[in-house]
Amino acid sequence: MAKGREHFGSGAAAVMAMAGSAIGLGNIWRFPYMVGQNGGAAFIIVYLLAAFFLSLPILLSESIVGRATHANTFGAMEKLAPGTRWKWLGFLTVISPLIILSYYSVVGGWSIEYLIKAAGSGFNEEVSSLFGEFIVKPWAPLICHTLFLLLTVAVVSAGVKSGIERFNRVSLPLLFILIVVIMVYSLTLPGAYAGVSYLLKPDFSKITPSVVAAAMGQSFFSLSLGVGTILTYSSYMKHSENLFSSGLGTAAFDLLFALIAGFAIMPAVFAAGIEPGAGPGLIFETLPYIFANMGAAAPWLSRTVSILFFLTIVIAALTSSISMCEVGVAYLVEERGQSRRKASLLVFAGTWLLGALCSLSFGPLSGVHLFGRTIFDFCDHLTSDYLMTFGSLLFVLFVGWKMPRMTVWNEFTNGGSLPGNRRLFGPVWFLIRYVAPLVILTIFVTNLVS
Ligand code: TRP
């Protein structure tokens, strides 16, 4: 282990950090909608298969590289494949999370604005048109974006243990408590049952190849794969920790949160008699509208739930953005000899600037297009459709074909000392070496063609 390098205090702390990275906007604004649209329980089964047979092996690949080297993404490649082109994978995975961080923090900023609104004047009937008016403004979203990034950077610059670990240790349980409270409220609304049946009614006829591909894409995004965050967090795990159970725990928490979020959101949407949608519209238009409407019957209750809801979103987004930020900071500290504080400031400066452009691309810069998309959309599509899949592909190829099998085995079984993992190694190795690359390549090409 590199001298003076920090590590997470326990396996549970590592799982909480990784689950914190995984649980984010993806679980709240896309998963519930995808489930409802694409066959309910049938989709959940497909998603489960994708999560455990495809995403988990990718996650494990990143974990193996991270913990084998105890290094940042760039340093990891230098250690395992010095002087080769694999260093570009190291670079790619420093850049990708920072691009994600830039636009993610714009959305994080919107959530802060809505949290403040919920706690302040509350929402009224006009709330759904408010969103469109808000995001095109030049200043307010920019200030919120800045605030969100500052919070992110503050946690990261406090260090792996006293910043990241401490923040996640509190946030992750809190997130689950909050979302369960909202779910209970939502399920007790009159007419909530329609939302439950939207989520659960199995319809296998909806399962087409493109739905399967979408399930896989969602599972990549939700588990933060392919961009070095899992690698970086795993590099802070001790050699005694069990990589398989940490990875499994992370995937399980991520799925559980997504499901609970579904039961927190859809029953409320249906109770209000609204057609569900996905994306920013769901969180910033539909739900505040519902909160506003319930206000008449029990103002204090709807007020409380709306505050709790936006608090959940802000915290969920922060635990993700922190993990993206750490990838860049770890690189600058370990490869460029910066202090953690200076590295955090540098990441702040870079992502603030790109994020500002993303934020302004809804208003003053909406005329600026890159490959036919606004700056925000371009960054989103570049990362979700290409960089995450491409990064994931390279990671499984690296672990499956470049790393010595013995090194992988050692890392996965802790030098042979974990009997359960020894038995699992064969199937996991097969998934990493053959299945994952072929499937990811298919998704990648499909994205490229469409
Ligand atoms: N998993 C996060 C979510 O569900 C989003 C995300 C995508 C992410 N890629 C990431 C988070 C990389 C951290 C790092 O919202």
Image: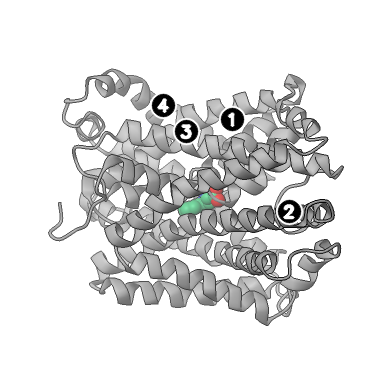
Q: Nearer the viewer, residue 188 or 195?
A: 188
- Three-letter amino acid code at the position of disc 4: Leu
Residue at mark 4: 431
Q: For marks 4 and 2, give the one nearer the viewer.
A: 2
**Mark sitting earlier along the chain (4/2):** 2
- Three-letter amino acid code at the position of disc 2: Ser
Q: For marks 3 and 4, give the one nearer the viewer.
A: 3
Residue at mark 1: 47
Q: What is the quadrant of residue 113 in the picture?
A: bottom right
Residue at mark 2: 302
Residue 378, given in percent of the width and then of the height, sits at: 64, 62
Residue 114, given in percent of the width and then of the height, sits at: 67, 65
- Mark 3 to mark 2 CA distance (whole Å): 31 Å
- Mark 3 to mark 4 CA distance (whole Å): 19 Å
Q: Which label was assigned to residue 252? A: 3
Helix, strand or loop at disc 2? helix
Q: For marks 1 and 3, give the one nearer the viewer.
A: 3
Residue 29, given in percent of the width and then of the height, sits at: 66, 48
Please give the name of the residue rendered at 59% of the width and 73% of the height, measured from the top-left corner: 144
Respond yes or no on whether mark 3 lies under 8 Å from ligand 1.
no
From the image, which quarter does the C terminus lie in?
top right
Q: How is the image coloured?
A: one colour
- Mark 1 to mark 2 CA distance (whole Å): 32 Å
Q: Are marks 3 and 2 in contact (CB under 8 Å)?
A: no
